[in-house]
Image: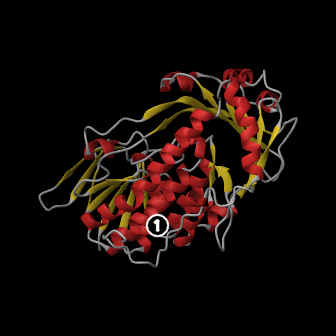
Amino acid sequence: MTDALIIGGGIAGVVTAMALQRAGIHAVVHESHASGADDAGAFLTVFANGLQALHAIDAHRPVIDNSFPAERVEFISNTGKRLGSRPIAGFDGGAGARTLKRATLYRVLHEEAERRGVTIEHGKRFAAAHTAPNGRIVASFADGGRAQGDLLIGADGIHSLTRKIIDAAAPRPRFTGQTTVCGFTRDAPEPPEPGTYTMIYGKRAFFGCTATPDGEVWWFANAPGPEIPRDRLAAVTPEQWRERVAALFDEDRTPAASLVRATGDEIVASNAYDLASVPNWYGDAMIVIGDAAHAAAPNAAQGASMAMEDGVLLAACLRDLPRRRAFAAFERLRRPRVERLVATSAAMSRHTTPGALGRMVRDVVLPLRLDRGSAGADDWLTGHTIDWNATVSDRPAR
């Protein structure tokens, strides 16, 4: 049986391990954090394409059972004008988009993986890798431990060490010019409708919020500004974030500022990055997936779903093809899709806070687009499916 070392126990790593197990490949996940719940304070949406990927390996139910639906998106301008709404698509025979905290997603995926017998080793900070004389790849960890396998999968995030080992000249993550701030409040003066994401095009920043079934409001703001060093980011208090973010929306006639000011200490922030294109995804026995290979700005909110797609498709490739050909097939099948997403999300980031003329045009054009209907507009993204039972070929389709 083939043995795989997976570096990183986040979404991509754990889903890949479960998919590999289903493909008959043994995998051990090596996670640097003690709990595996990095960035625990944030929340995210798993879209239909991500749920379908989980469905392909029968791992979707824990996510659905521990989340709540995201059914519609409503758009509001900085003047308070309602610009329109559109539905969030589901997938045939399954659920639509679901919202949950990142820590919850990590927890339920880890529990499901461990229930299936997948080994997840915590506190294993990846340090280096080399090929042994027997042809096996050896991973070294900061605690002095080592592990051997037939291949190594780097699911170690946007600041991936695996990516650097594969290609020392690999591009660094690009700061997108915004900080994403998330908060949670039970004292919202104007909570959104259940099942609805309210998206607000503020004059100075972009804001989004949704309500849980029990009435708590979860919100995020994409705030333009310079990159904040990690130590300084950690030093900013929730009170400081609350006032900084609320001030961005004080000039708008929307509920954003009041929602932020109704929030207590449950506020977290992170710099937003992307990776436009990574030239080399794999070497002889190593490959990167998820944010380590391609990372989009948070505007499209597809990071988790793309990681799920990656894990399932890579496992199918390794099931059906020898390692090197499997890596090549995976890249051929994935690169056009993920790079299109990165470009789409970057464009969304640029267009959320235009100047006065841009706001005027947007407030006229967006309602017309929504009135004409958006059915099918996102089919390439949320309508994507992976057929687990289909055999992967290393020959491009004619």
Query: Is residue 198 among what the camera can see?
Result: no
Q: Secondary structure at mark 1?
A: helix
Figure disc tally: 1
Residue at horizontal 53 percent and vertical 45 percent from the top: 344
Q: Position of residue 384 (x, y in %)?
A: 54, 64
Residue at horizontal 59 percent and vertical 46 percent from the top: 300
**338 displayed left or right of 221:** left
Q: Position of residue 28 (x, y in %)?
A: 38, 61
Considering the image in quadrants, where does the C terminus appear? bottom left
The residue that mark 1 highlights is 18
**78 displayed left or right of 173:** right
Where residue 170 sits, quadrant-wise, is: top left
Residue at horizontal 26 percent and vertical 44 percent from the top: 165
Considering the image in quadrants, where does the N terminus appear? bottom left
Q: Nearer the viewer, residue 317 or 369?
A: 369
Q: Is residue 296 above or below residue 244?
A: below
- In the picture as drawn, the residue positioned furthest to the left comes out as 133
Q: Is residue 342 above or below residue 107?
A: above
Q: Residues within 10 Å of mark 1 (few under 14, many from 20)?
A: many
Q: Nearer the viewer, residue 184 or 29?
A: 184
Q: Looking at numbered disc 1 in the image, what kind of residue is underneath it?
A: Met
- In the picture as drawn, the residue positioned furthest to the right comes out as 189
Q: Nearer the viewer, residue 208 or 376?
A: 376
Where residue 299 sits, quadrant-wise, is: top right
Q: Position of residue 131 (x, y in %)?
A: 18, 54
Where residue 6 sits, quadrant-wise, is: bottom left
Q: Position of residue 19 (x, y in %)?
A: 45, 68
Q: Nearer the viewer, residue 195 or 286?
A: 195
**319 displayed left or right of 186:** left
Q: Is residue 83 above or below residue 310?
A: above
